Image (spheres, rainbow, N blue to C red):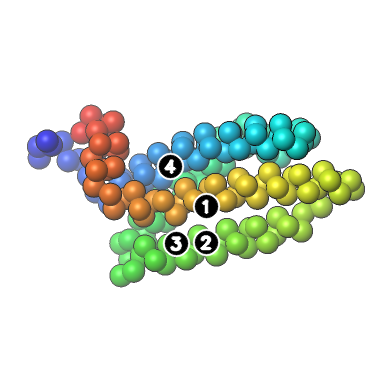
Amino acid sequence: MRNNNQIKLDNSFSRAILTGLFLGICATLVCFIYSITYRSITSFYLSFFVNVTWIIFGCNLALLTAGIVYSGFKKNFRYGNVFFVILFIAIALFGLWKVGSIQRSDIQIISQHFRGLLSGIIIIITVGIILIPVLYGNRKFQDNIILNDLGI
């Protein structure tokens, strides 16, 4: 049980950021597994753009940013959760639509494999972003994962 001196990070902004960072780490691991599996199944190893560095920074920055945006939505809108989810689903759908038109190479199969790899990563990141409001509102998650791991 926490006492009054230990509730320093128990505010909406900190909880949203830490939830985003936690989901960023989870999304990074899932993206690694997806990338390795996808590449081994399709034998697609030519992607300079989707590499380990990009996955690490891309997933974590996307979910950190989403945590910050969620905090703003939660604070400024009555139905911030709903607006947040709708916004990021719309962004993901737009991104998937644009990925569908990427011509990565003159060889059609290489472009198809690249689109498949990038689309999967976008979907994984979007699922992580959608989970921010779910885990933010889950008191057990906040108490046992976010605040407990910080020693609070």
Q: Position of residue 12 (x, y in %)?
A: 27, 52
User: Marks 4 and 3: in contact by CB < 8 Å?
Assistant: no
Q: Which mark is residue 126?
A: 1
User: Marks 1 and 2: in contact by CB < 8 Å?
Assistant: yes
Residue where numbered disc 2 is placed: 89
Q: Position of residue 67 (x, y in %)?
A: 40, 50
| Alpha carbon distance from label 4 to label 2 | 17 Å
Q: Dot 1, how many residues are within 10 Å of its Cα: few (below 14), some (14-19), or many (20+)?
A: many
Q: Earlier in the sequence, mark 2 or mark 1?
A: 2
| Alpha carbon distance from label 2 to label 3 | 6 Å
Residue at left offset 41%, top offset 51%: 131
Q: Earlier in the sequence, mark 4 or mark 1?
A: 4
User: Marks 2 and 4: in contact by CB < 8 Å?
Assistant: no
The amino acid on which the numbered mark 1 sits, given as a three-letter code, is Thr
Q: Dot 2, how many residues are within 10 Å of its Cα: few (below 14), some (14-19), or many (20+)?
A: some
Residue where numbered disc 4 is placed: 23
Residue where numbered disc 3 is placed: 85
Q: Position of residue 51 (x, y in %)?
A: 67, 34
Return the residue nearer the eye: 43 or 1. Answer: 43
Q: Earlier in the sequence, mark 3 or mark 1?
A: 3
